[in-house]
């Protein structure tokens, strides 16, 4: 028997990275660079980071762009290649999840124990 699967289910193994987080690249051609997360794709374990992993794409001429040419844009990057930078201590850190007395779950820094989610 086949079970129906939804393509928009969250990946339970996805690192705790959210849009607008500041991250540092750990490996690859852009190793050591820092940027802000623009887009998160949890199903494919990919993220887009500002000014990281840029590609040059050829564009055919059309009515909007009659001359055509090349476009430089950011490409997806595997989420396991980056690490979140803590906004308070400015270090790359792993994320721990803390439940507040109000019942709300927040992400916190492993180094300084400050909340990343404000």
Image (cartoon, rainbow, N blue to C red):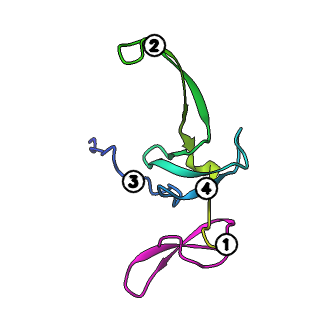
The disc label shown at residue 60, or none = 2
Depicted 35 relative to depicted 98: above or below: above
CA separation, marks 2 and 4?
34 Å
- For mark 1, what is the residue? 89
Q: Is residue 106 magenta?
A: yes
Circle 3 sits on which residue? 10
Q: Are marks 4 and 3 in contact (CB under 8 Å)?
A: no
Question: How far apart are the two marked residues, 3 and 1, measured between alpha carbons?
Answer: 29 Å
The residue located at (53%, 51%) in the rendering is: 37
Q: Position of residue 17 (x, y in %)?
A: 52, 58
Q: Few, some or many C-alpha atoms within 10 Å of disc 3 (few <14, some 14-19, many ≥20)?
A: few
Position above or below: 69 against 88: above
Residue located 37% across and 18% down the image: 64
Give the CA distance from mark 1 to mark 4: 13 Å
The residue that disc 4 covers is: 23
The dot on residue 27 is: none
- Residue 11 placement, left or right of 109: left
Q: Residue at (63%, 48%) from the top-left corner?
A: 81
Q: Secondary structure at mark 2?
A: loop
């Amino acid at each position: 028997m086949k079970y129906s699967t939804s393509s928009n289910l969250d990946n339970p193994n996805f690192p705790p990275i959210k849009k607008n987080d500041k991250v540092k690249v750990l490996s690859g051609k852009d190793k050591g660079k820092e940027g802000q997360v623009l887009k998160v794709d949890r199903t494919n374990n990919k993220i887009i980071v500002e000014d990281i992993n840029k590609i040059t794409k050829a564009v055919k001429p059309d009515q909007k762009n009659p001359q055509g040419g090349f476009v430089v844009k950011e490409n997806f990057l595997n989420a396991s290649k980056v690490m979140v930078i803590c906004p308070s201590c400015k270090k790359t850190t792993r994320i721990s999840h803390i439940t507040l007395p109000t019942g709300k779950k927040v992400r916190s820094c492993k180094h300084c124990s400050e909340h990343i989610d404000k």
